[in-house]
Amino acid sequence: MKRIFISVAAATIVAAAFSGCASAKKASSHGGRASGGKITSVEQLSIVPGAKVDAPRFLGGVYSKNLVADGAAGAFPVTNLIVFEPKARSAWHTHGGMILLITDGVGYYQEEGKPAQILRKGDIFEIPEGVRHWHGASKDSWFSQIVIYDSHWNGAHGDGKIEFVSDEEYEQLAEEEYAGRVEPKFGSQMFSRAEKGAKLPTFTGTAFVNDLTGAENAAKCPPLHYVVFEPGVINNWHIHEGGQILLATDGIGYHQIEGEAVQILRPGDVAICPPGIKHWHGGSSNSTFAHIATNLDPSKRGVTWLEAVSQEAYKAIEAEAGITK
């Protein structure tokens, strides 16, 4: 039996300080998101925050964790987890195009001269390149977001001045709910799953697949797909011609590259499979598992499906990982 690999992120000093996050009961509301979703303590966050940021461009407590470094996953853009304490916010700024995937809480995004958009868990928001804006948490909620952005944009990033929305302006914000929110939201996962599941011959049970972004998006990244596995459902061994990246959002799951250790995935963990390499992934038997998936090279879309993972191997993985139904 191959050894089990558990993400080292949870073993860092910062993660230890926030050790209650992953297991704590989540306070956010998935249904009727326009009236709920506040996170009042760090322990309620779905993904463990990273290190506290000490930079003049932020006001209040802000935490950052790199999820995908530049060049680590082919041409896939830099991806970070940014967490704001209540009332914390960025300065006004511009940058390359960005996708915000809201993972927890309630926060704001405001473009210059426009009302602040209220963003909530499950929202997907695109920021065009070169637009002056700020974003941060609401007055009474933590705010967590995965940011995928074009770090190679060579446009003007501002005049170097650091300017914030003042405390008075912040308290009197003209605000409105994000008009692009997807409602109704199906399922209880971080993002809205597909309304109907499918039982495919290459999966051991029902899985739900839908698109979070299209091929044309602000961050210039491949389309993002959201896959939700019912408890115990995994897929067969397979090969992506262009490679694949997985970002876990819900539950506990597994990923394995042929000849390597099984990777246990929890919210915030990332798995990268290079092009042409055999792998499989799916959920544990005791939780609904979900991840964001995308092809590392959209020009190479081929997938070769192979044999199933044996039930004996799956049970051995669960036993070694200490997973019980």
Image (cartoon, rainbow, N blue to C red):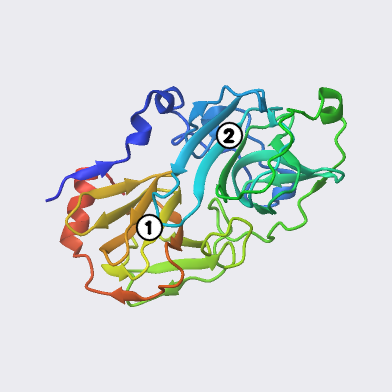
Q: Is residue 161 left or right of residue 285?
A: right
Is 268 rendered above or below residue 312?
above
Give the mark nearest the N terminus, 1 or 2: 2
Image coordinates for residue 4, horizontal then vertical, percent = 21, 45
Q: Quadrant of residue 139?
A: top right
For the point 49% across and 67% down, which residue is it? 209
The amino acid sitting under disc 2 is Val
Instruction: Name, please, the residue furthest toward the left.
Output: 1
Residue occupying image coordinates x 42% and y 48%: 251
What mark, if any, has residue 83 been given in the picture?
2
- 30 is higher (above) or lower (below) than 167: below
* Residue 141 sits in quarter: top right
Q: Amino acid at mark 1?
A: Pro
Q: Secondary structure at mark 1?
A: loop
Q: What residue did someone put label 1 on?
A: 231
The residue lying toward the viewer, choosing from 37 and 214, is 214
- In the image, is residue 12 above or below residue 247? above
